[in-house]
Amino acid sequence: MSISVEITPTTPIQQVNITTTASGPAITPVSASSDFMIPSPNNLYEYTAAALPSPTDVVSATAIANLSSVGVAAGLQVNVGIAASSSFQNEMQGFKSLYKSFNNSPANFTHGQTCYFKTQNSVAYNCNLQAVNVADDAYGQSQLFIFLAFANTNLYVMRKGYFDYPTNSTMIENWVPGRTLYIASNNKLTTAPVFSSGAYVRSVGFCVPNTDGVYRVWFESDNTFVKKS
């Protein structure tokens, strides 16, 4: 014997609401952190989170919650932490160049030395690495680089970026915080441009103020130039 039971939902005849008054905001806005890199040549994808101003005008409010929704709403999940890398630092890596099998004797160059490529036929890449020379036509008309390394016939140079020179470096002189950098007649980095006849004058970056006790520079050669008559 079976009994059929039919259940029909109906509209509730009474609804109970709970009125709540916020005594304080659940989440208090604070200054946001943004990706600001401290100028450093170590290229370890490091950056410093710097606080920026944000609005804090949060007001209390009255809210109504139905009993039927109590315990059903999903919880608020907030993920916090430190980003693994800085996109800016990743982009800076793109200004470092590798020339494989560049065996045209650049082994006598020193880490941090300013250089450029000079045409020479019948060799790899049809050029040699040339130390800066403000009186050379190729210097005035070429992209400048900072020499990083030469290992196993592979040449590593940097076209743009931060670089630290120790204060006893023989490759830089007259370092002054904030000043524009040029190449001196002795082929060193300097804040005093050369105005002798036949010399090319072009900026190659600027001196970066720092508290690390080094001659920190932002290297970025200007591809426009003036040649003294």
Image: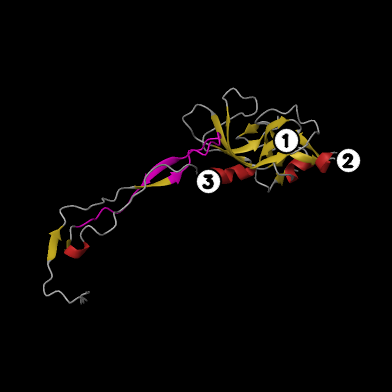
Which residue does the image show at 65% across and 24% down from the upper left? 170
- x, y (%) of residue 82? 42, 42
Q: Secondary structure at mark 3?
A: helix
The residue positioned 78% from the left and 42% from the top of the image is: 138
Q: Which residue is mark 2?
A: 122
**Mark 1 residue element:** strand
Name which of mark 1 and mark 2 comes first in the sequence: 2
Q: What is the secondary structure assignment of the residue under circle 2?
A: loop
Q: What amino acid is found at the position of numbered circle 3 in the picture?
A: Phe
Q: In the image, which residues are magenta?
A: 35-59
Gap in Å between the C-alphas at discs 3 and 1?
24 Å
Residue under pointer 1:
155
| Magenta-drawn stretch, dominant element (helix, strand or loop) | loop
The one nearer the camera, 227 or 36, is 36
Q: Position of residue 1 (x, y in %)?
A: 22, 74
Please tell me which of labels 2 and 3 falls first in the chain.
3
